[in-house]
Amino acid sequence: MISIKLLNKISPVYKSVWPEEAYSVSAEAENPQAIVVRSADMHEMEIEKSVLAVARAGAGTNNIPLEKLGKQGVVVFNTPGANANAVKELVVAGMLLASRDIVGGIEWAKGLKGEGANVAKLVEKGKGQFVGPELKGKTLGIIGLGAIGSMVANAARALEMEVVGFDPYITVDHAWMLSRAVQRARSQDEVLEKCDYLSVHVPLLNDTRGFLNAQLLKKMKKGAVILNFARGELAADADILSALESGDLRAYVTDFPNENLIGQKGVIAIPHLGASTPESEDNCVDMACRQISAYLANGTIKNSVNYPDCELEAGAAHRIAVLHANVPNTVGSITSLVAAYDINIDNMVNKSRGQFAYTVLDLDEAPPEILLDKIENLEAIYRVRSF
């Protein structure tokens, strides 16, 4: 029986991936092989030695100590793209809210309660203060054309907007997803200079923290709108507010409210609703469960955020999977130990990602326990698994 621990309540769709006769899934699981988490903070948690994998049912992993778990031989997964459609729809809603003062109009209309037959007349008299431009014909700039950014680009084209995007790391798959009408910018500055609306879809890293700052804002059209549905920390709040006050920025739409932004003129703060749809939650959980199952079953790693992805064929009779530091001579040390026991290596895969590496050996006979122990005792080794 495979034991899975839940740190948050998740969609019951997991039951279609993990049958009850083979998996025990609960918040109280002891000695689990894997953990599924959504928002729970894992930085101060003690992780049981039994844990082989952690899956975040969502994209962001700021609540997970990636390096710490990597050095414990724990592979961390996320679910990129599972909530992409939900976020895309909210970005489109954000553009509409920022273009025409819909929120202000709704709040104003509430104040007409009690005016009786005069409501219609007052509406016609007062509606002019909420006038705003249409999206058709305006230019949307997108920085980051991954799963979400590419879908936002296509949605904007369907609204007859001009779209210009920049992503130096765009994948072939995401490039194929884009409408031919999306213009490819040669630089980030080209996007900033052209756009009436800017939608940012980049990960939060040390070098992207505060990315939306005064220096960037100076390169944009006066009166542009910024949409941030990626991470709140991408924005330098003080710079955003200063640009709003001066009129250099018309609106800032964010899915990440904080004390600095709430109630400020020009800020539309949405309470982190990007992935808050039942479809999105189902998709995230389904993907997380399948990734855990594949890793536990045959060592396949897909959508890891600390170890390299490694697609492996099922059916190997005897397999050793080794999680280790990405340092010289480690692979040679592993294969030398295997050779010392006169065991033939039928196939070998070695991949690395930053400081972590993954080596998988398919052997023509079962490795003895003493061999596995010797590999695990090598200096750079974090974990050894056999199948």
Image (tube, rainbow, N blue to C red):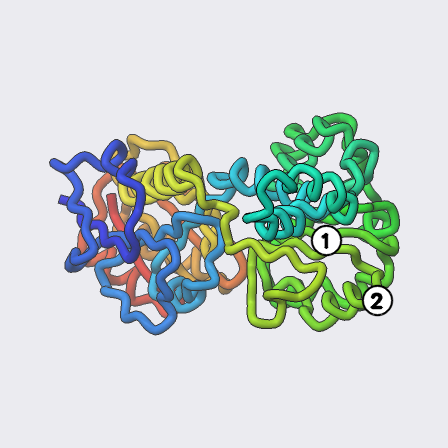
Amino acid type at circle 2 is: Ser
Name the one closer to the observer, 176 or 337. Answer: 176
Task: Residue 173 in the image: state x and y as whole percent.
Answer: 61, 32
Task: Residue 305 in the image: state x and y as whole percent.
Answer: 47, 54
Q: Is residue 286 above or below residue 31?
A: above
Q: At x 43% / y 56%, what residue is drawn?
A: 331
Residue 345 shows in this picture: no
Nearer-N-terminus badge (1/2): 1
Q: Which mark is residue 155?
A: none
**Quarter of the picture holding the C terminus:** top left
Task: Residue 54 in the image: state x and y as whole percent.
Answer: 34, 54
Name the one closer to the observer, 354 or 3. Answer: 3
Residue 116 as seen in the image, left or right of residue 23: right
How crowded pointer 1 is (Cα within 10 Å; few <14, some 14-19, many 20+) is rated as many
Q: Residue tagged by mark 2?
A: 246
Q: Residue tagged by mark 1?
A: 226
Amino acid type at circle 1 is: Ile
Spatial CA distance of label 1 from label 2 is 15 Å
Q: At x 13% / y 44%, what residue is drawn?
A: 1
Task: Say which element carries label 1.
Answer: strand
Q: At x 62% / y 67%, what residue is drawn?
A: 261
Name the one closer to the observer, 116 or 277. Answer: 116
Task: Say which element carries label 2.
Answer: helix
How crowded pointer 2 is (Cα within 10 Å; few <14, some 14-19, many 20+) is rated as few
Task: Residue 343 in the image: state x and y as whole percent.
Answer: 28, 45
Q: Residue furthest front?
A: 117
Q: At x 20% / y 55%, what residue is drawn?
A: 27
Residue 134 shows in this picture: yes
